[in-house]
Image: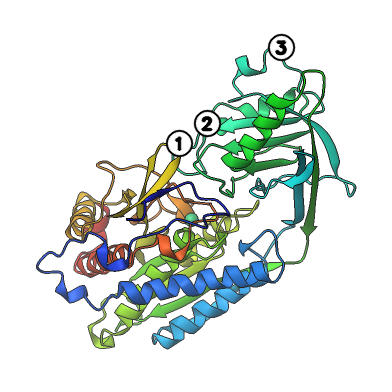
Amino acid sequence: MPSACIAPSEQTGGLEFTPDSSYLQLSNPGNEAYASIDGDRMKRLVEQQTDIAQRYRQAGNQFWGRIIGTSADSETADWMMVQLRESGVENVRLDSIPLPTQWLPQSWQLTVELDGKATQLTSAWPAYGSVGTSGAGAKLELIDVGLGMATDFQGRDVSGKAVVLHSIATSSTVFNSVRRIGALQRAEQLGAAAIFIVLELPGNLQTAFYDVGTSVPTFSIGSADGAILQRLLTDAALTEPVEIDLQFEVDYVDGLSTSSVRGEVLAASPDAEKIVIVAHRDAYFEGAADNASGVATALELMRYFAQIPKADRKRTVEIIGTPGHHNIARTGFTWLFENRESILDKAVLLINAEHTAHALVDRFGDDLCTTNAIGPFSWQINGSNKLAEITLQAFDDFGIPRWAETGGPVGEIRTIADLVPSIVLMHAGILLHTNIETTEAIPAASLAATTRAYAKIIEQVNSMSHSELTQ
Ligand SMILES: [Zn+2]
C-alpha cells in the first residue's frame, strides 16, 4: 500500500490526500435541510481560485499567488462577481481601493557550489517585506548559528555574513521559534548581511513568512536545502569560508489598486437589519485554505440564502470579498476599520469566512502524513452566551473538530470584530503559507461542514433580536 507519509519536496510534489469520499463525517438527524450546501461544488470554487494563482505563476511571476494589487487580484475579484451574479445575488459591485507603495519581489536566486557544481536553493522564498540586493547581487560568507538563541551567538562573528538560523514551526509556518525568541533582531544587531531561516518542517517546502521587520535580505528555506548548507559548512576546512551567491530584486510599485467585492441577498423589508460575511481574497501560492476555502464558503452561503423567497427573508445577507492582509499595508484590516460605520450599519452579526476547511496533516519523524480526518479549528465569538451556545452547538452538530476553548487568530476582521456580534472559525494548520497548500488539501466534507454550520447559525440568529445577540 502507498505510504501516507512523505517528506514533500520538488521531487515528490505535494502530499497525496485521500479521496473526498473517505473523510470521516458526522450526519446528525435534523441537518438534512442543509444538504443543498454542496462540498463538491465549493471544492470546484477553491480550484478555480487556485487556477488563477497558477496562471499568474505561469505568466512568469516568481513571487506568485493571488497577490494584492496584481492581475491575479483583479482576476479573483472579477471571478467572484461572476459567481455572485450567477447565484442571483443583488447589488454586485466593486469598491476600488488605492494602494500605497507595494513591495513586489521580481526575482531571486540563491546559489552555492556543491561538489564542484553551481547549485540553487530552490525552496528559497523572500520573507514578506524583505529588502533586495543591489543589481550585482552579493557574495557572502555563510555562518550557521543554530536556533539563534543568545548563547548560539556567543563567540561567533556574524558581521557582514549570511546568517543561517534554524526555526521550529510551532503551528504553521507563521508561528515559529526564530520569530518567538527574537533571533532575527539578534542577527541583525550583530551585523548580519543577510538572513536565511531554515524552517525545520519535513521535506523542502517553500514557505511565506509574515513581515519579519529586518533591514537585510531575509529568506525562508526548506529543511532539505538547509541540510545542503550544513553539509557545505561541515565539509569545509575551518580556514576556508563557504560562500553563497545571493541575487534578489524587489520592486516598490506605486499607483496600484485593489478592491472589495460586495453583494447582497436583500431582505423583504428595505430597512431590515443585516448579517455580514467577510472573506479575504488574497493568498500566497495556491492558498487553497488561505483563503480560497473561506471565499468558497462565503459564496456558497450567498447562493443558499438567495434561493430563499424574498418575502421570507428577515435580514439582508451581505458578502464582502476584501483585499486581504498579505501585504505590508495590511489593506484589508485598514479598509474594514476605515469603513466600519457603513459596513456595520444595521449589522447584527459579522462572520469571518477564513481558512474554513482543511485536512488534518500529522507529523511522523521526517515526514508529513495525510489522514482521513478534517483538521481542527480555533474559534472566537463576540456576543451573548446564547449566540455562543447556538454557534458551538452548530459546529458540533456538523462534526467540526475544534479547540475545547476559545482562542486563536481573528484574521481579516480583527479591526472590527469587537464592534458587533461576530464569529470566527479558522485554522492555522501546518500547510498554511506553504507551496503545498493545494486544492487536494481541502476536503469537500470540511467545506460542507463549516458552511452548513454557518447557514444554520444564520437561520437561528434570524429568530433572535439584536439585544439577544449582544446581552
Ligand atoms: Zn487568511
Please state which of the two labelled residues, at mark 3 or mark 2, is closer to the viewer: 3
Q: Amino acid at mark 1?
A: Thr
The location of residue 279, given as percent across then percent down, is 45, 64
Q: Quadrant of residue 441?
A: bottom left
Labels 2 and 1 touching (C-beta < 8 A)? yes
Residue labelled with disc 3 = 155
Counting residues from the start of the chain, the first of labels 1 and 3 encountered is 3
Label count reads 3
The location of residue 94, given as percent across then percent down, is 56, 77
Identify whether 65 is placed above or below 419: below
Note whether ligand 1 is within 8 Å of mark 2. Answer: no
Cα separation, mark 3 vs mark 2, equals 22 Å
Q: Quadrant of the N terminus?
A: bottom left
Q: Which disc, if any, is residue 177?
A: 2
Labels 3 and 2 touching (C-beta < 8 A)? no
Counting residues from the start of the chain, the first of labels 2 and 1 encountered is 1
The location of residue 411, given as percent across then percent down, is 46, 52
Residue 299 in the figure: left or right of residue 328: left
Counting residues from the start of the chain, the first of labels 3 and 2 encountered is 3
Residue 86 visible to an observer of this rendering: yes
Identify whether 44 is placed above or below 209: below
Element type where label 2 sits in the image: helix
> Which residue lies at the image location 39% right of the left edge and 71% below the top edge?
43
Residue labelled with disc 1 = 170
60, 269: nearer the viewer: 60
Element type where label 1 sits in the image: loop
Q: Which disc, if any, is residue 233?
A: none
